[in-house]
Image: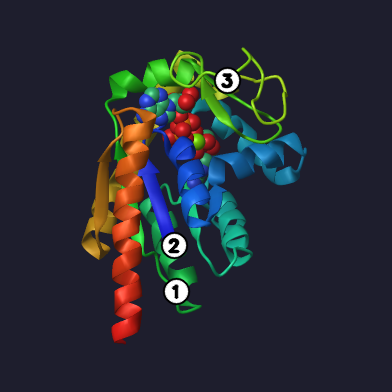
Amino acid sequence: MRLVLLGAPGAGKGTQCKNIVTEHGLLHLSSGDILRQERAAGTELGARAQSYMDSGALVPDEIVIGMMAKAIEEAPASGFVLDGFPRTVNQAIELDKALAATGLKIDAVLNLKIDDRVVAARMTGRRSCPQCGAVYHIENLKPKIKGQCDHDATDLVQRPDDSLEVVAQRLETYHRQTEPLVDYYKQNGTVYEFDAGESVDEVKASILEKLDTLDKTRSADAVSN
Ligand code: AP5
Ligand code: MG
């Protein structure tokens, strides 16, 4: 299955992708995570992306599209879930073209809907593991030992773009440049919407139920064809 997960900053895209990966064996491809890895590795691409990310703006399409095309090309045949990409209508068009060239397409788009007012509390309380990428929250999703990753005991860090000021800019960027994608995908297929204001487990249950239904439909279609 090839999935796109849409949603504002802090909607829970990264958190829910971890669940989808575990249950459905898909590769999690987060453009934000890949950009942060490039920055940590000190690459030229990472250096070019830095000022955009730190200010809450989008990294230009000519940097992101090539980077994600390469990651998708290397993905296994079992499929992937895209988190944070595409983020502009132009990126979505380029993604569709690249997939169509190899006879593939996006099977489903999942949209996590969240109120802007909920986002600020989520972002300022988020902590993540620089080693394995696990995501926590100081109130909602605490690690077993304060400040330490459950998986590898690495000290948790706060993302530099999670300050209130940058979060406000990221939300503005989201509404202006990314939200129009929901309509783009509605015109080109089905978008499944989820209330991302519910608890992590409730959102997880709704997404997994929908994916199970889609899986069954795909299997039935494959048998009848
Ligand atoms: P990116 O890393 O993609 O950031 P984002 O879209 O702003 O989203 P986040 O990762 O902040 O939020 P999330 O939805 O993953 O939430 P999470 O699960 O962590 O992008 C960063 C930057 O890179 C961009 O600003 C841009 O500059 C650049 N970039 C990336 N992709 C690009 C592209 N395609 N084009 C151009 N530029 C690009 O959850 C957040 C917190 O809430 C956590 O603490 C979590 O524990 C908690 N939480 C999650 N779900 C719940 C819940 N249901 N209830 C309570 N708490 C919850
Ligand atoms: Mg994320």
| Place of residue 170 in the rendered image (x, y in percent of width and height, measured from the top left) | 42, 29
In the rendered structure, are the residues bearing label 3 and label 1 in contact, judged by CB atoms less than 8 Å apart?
A: no
From the image, tell me which residue sits under label 3.
Answer: 143
Of mark 2 and mark 3, the one earlier in the sequence is 2
Residue ID at (34%, 55%): 211
Of mark 2 and mark 1, the one earlier in the sequence is 2
Residue ID at (36%, 54%): 89
What type is the residue that disc 3 sits on? Pro
Report if residue 73 is visible in the image.
Answer: yes
Image quadrant assignment for residue 164: top left
- Farthest residue in the bottom direction? 225
Residue 104: mark in rendering = 1
Residue ID at (47%, 43%): 19
Report if residue 59 is visible in the image.
Answer: no
Measured in 3D between alpha carbons, the distance from the residue under mark 2 to the one under mark 3, in whole angstroms, is: 31 Å
Label 2: element kind? strand
**Residue 106 drawn above or below residue 9:** below
